[in-house]
Amino acid sequence: MGSLVFVGLGLGPKGCSVQGVEEMRRAEVRYLEYYTSPHEPEMLTQLRKLGLEMTVVDRGFVEDGSRILSEAAEKKVALAALGDPMIATTHNELRTRAIKLGIETRVIHGATIASAAASASGLHSYRFSRTVTVTRESVNRLSQAYHILHENLLEEAHTLLLLEYDVQSGEGVSPADAMQGLLLAEANFKRGVVGESTFVLVLSRLGRADARLAAGSVSSLAGRTFGEPPHCIVVPGALHFTEKEAVAAIFSLEEASVQGNSGPVLRTAQTLVPRYVAKTKRALEQVQGKLGHEYDGVVENAELYMRDAERFLAEGEDEMAMLSVGYAEGLLDSLSFSGVAKLEW
Amino acid sequence: MGSLVFVGLGLGPKGCSVQGVEEMRRAEVRYLEYYTSPHEPEMLTQLRKLGLEMTVVDRGFVEDGSRILSEAAEKKVALAALGDPMIATTHNELRTRAIKLGIETRVIHGATIASAAASASGLHSYRFSRTVTVTRESVNRLSQAYHILHENLLEEAHTLLLLEYDVQSGEGVSPADAMQGLLLAEANFKRGVVGESTFVLVLSRLGRADARLAAGSVSSLAGRTFGEPPHCIVVPGALHFTEKEAVAAIFSLEEASVQGNSGPVLRTAQTLVPRYVAKTKRALEQVQGKLGHEYDGVVENAELYMRDAERFLAEGEDEMAMLSVGYAEGLLDSLSFSGVAKLEW
């Protein structure tokens, strides 16, 4: 009776768990797949020291999966990958196929970059929100990453940006590329999410002997190189004082230079409502006391709804604030469209 | 010269990495701390098999930290904990203190429940958003958890709820308690976030030999018991078809019974914009072709902005959608206030 066990190798050559090693020892067929990290000969050396000879396979082999599944129907097969083995969608799909074929499957979990990055940074891991993957394809048009970063900063939460590395081509997104991409997105969306002074952490090769950590403003880091991948970037939201202390200690910085990035970030309505309220005020000044009394209702309501918009915004009712200020503007603009008043917005 | 190495033991008795075992072997003093999982004698047995005798300590010992720090000034000290060692704020703070005292520190990462839960569930880990911890204190008033779950479902993202376990008292939050707490929060906030039919996954003792997985509606699971802690619950957002397949295979369910929970959850603007668009349409019908040509501009613009509102909403630009529909309404209402048209909204 065969089986298929997915083994997570954790973060580096010695990252596999005791249970993972035992499972691989019991396996009759052993595959090692690299997919998001560069091939490390050290990995094979370490596994060999543990008595584990591995067959290195590529992503296509796992995606196809037919050989693995036919072997696993009769033999004990182990498929090992860095990190946690089920982080890769491909492995999840292979597991589903195996279960459907009646093959016993097991998963041996491993340390992942997502939890290690939180942990290595000195930040509180429960204060991280949604993780973003920056691919080579998306790096020049980081709209989704930018919007998730914006949401996270509004929640005062930290954001982990994983920078893609492609084993097949040997190419990846460098920390400099990713920071440049975020600045481009800022120039496009202008929500004040990221800028030259944004404080970020760059974590490279976490869990390896040559791991490298750097922290500072985007402008101070964007020109630097950080050696071999894998890399990730952490953008802190608001910082608890113990997080400040920890980051300062771990990255050898003065505490004063460690700063969160949530402070200056505004909700979309916080940017827009004051702008439209100011416009409405200017228009109101142009019509108040200058039109016939048949327009009193229009003018009074425009003022009332403009005030409502400010109140709704203060209460966090962003949608109602936008509706109200739009309504006030519409009331006044109607006078302009029908020739009753000439308004300069 | 001393040092302090924090070793993650991963998810169970055999969860420690090869590197972690090596570090503990080199250590002259070895502490093992339990803080969020019940004490497992099996853990000590397994570590002893690896030649590692451990001194079990409690949280107070680590929080105080004075003995660890004084020993680490001169000897190699290892402090081991389940999961990743830096997930605990206490360990982060101890590390900061050690660095400030000039003591060399290292972190050996371990598999964590946060990444393993994603991985074991068959869901795509990058589609998880903010994690929620349900404490015994908060379980009857889950407002924060409820709001995070709401936000996550709106993003169509999955949510991991970690259920607290307290080693000192031996008490914790059961899956039934947590589900009941969410239903109470729903009764209070009424946002349609969670109900009897919400589809959830309950993952117990992940990474252990006696791990137990269950999935189904809240009503079908809320009355069940799931054995010893630790437990966690996953509330899926929207499901990709490969996720549906995987959950069905892993939890032995019919695919049709596996369902996401984002469908019925709406953004505020998704509720409001269609309502105001419908009102504007009714008002437009009352004036189109019935007023003098001097009002053509007003009527045409009202229609254009109403369409803009629908388009903005579809693009997720909620604020602009509310502004536009408010503006359209204001344009038409101005005619009503100034007596040009009698509108019934």
Image (cartoon, coloured by chain):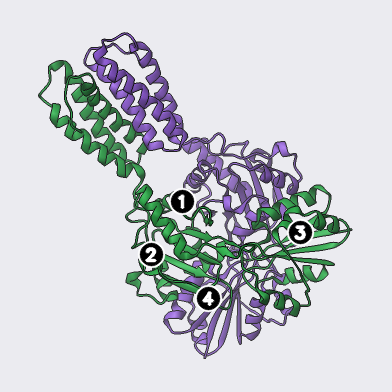
Chain colours: A green, B purple
Residue type at mark 1: give it: Arg
Residues under labels 4 and 1: Cα distance? 50 Å
Percent coordinates x, y for residue B286 in the rendering: 35, 11
Percent coordinates x, y for residue A228 in the rendering: 55, 72
Q: Earlier in the sequence, mark 1 or mark 2?
A: 1
Task: Tell which of B30 and A60 is nearer to you.
Answer: A60
Q: Is residue B95 left or right of residue A2?
A: left
Give the residue pinned by disc 1. A141
Residue type at mark 2: give it: Val
Percent coordinates x, y for residue B103 in the rendering: 48, 84
Badge 3 marks a residue whose secondary structure is strand
Q: Is residue B107 above or below residue A298?
A: below
User: Subunit of mark 4?
Assistant: B
What's the residue at 70%, 55% (across, down)?
A: A91
Q: Which mark is residue A106?
A: 3
Badge 2 marks a residue whose secondary structure is helix
Of labels 4 and 3, the one closer to you: 3
Q: Earlier in the sequence, mark 3 or mark 1?
A: 3
Q: Which mark is residue B61?
A: 4
User: Subunit of mark 3?
Assistant: A
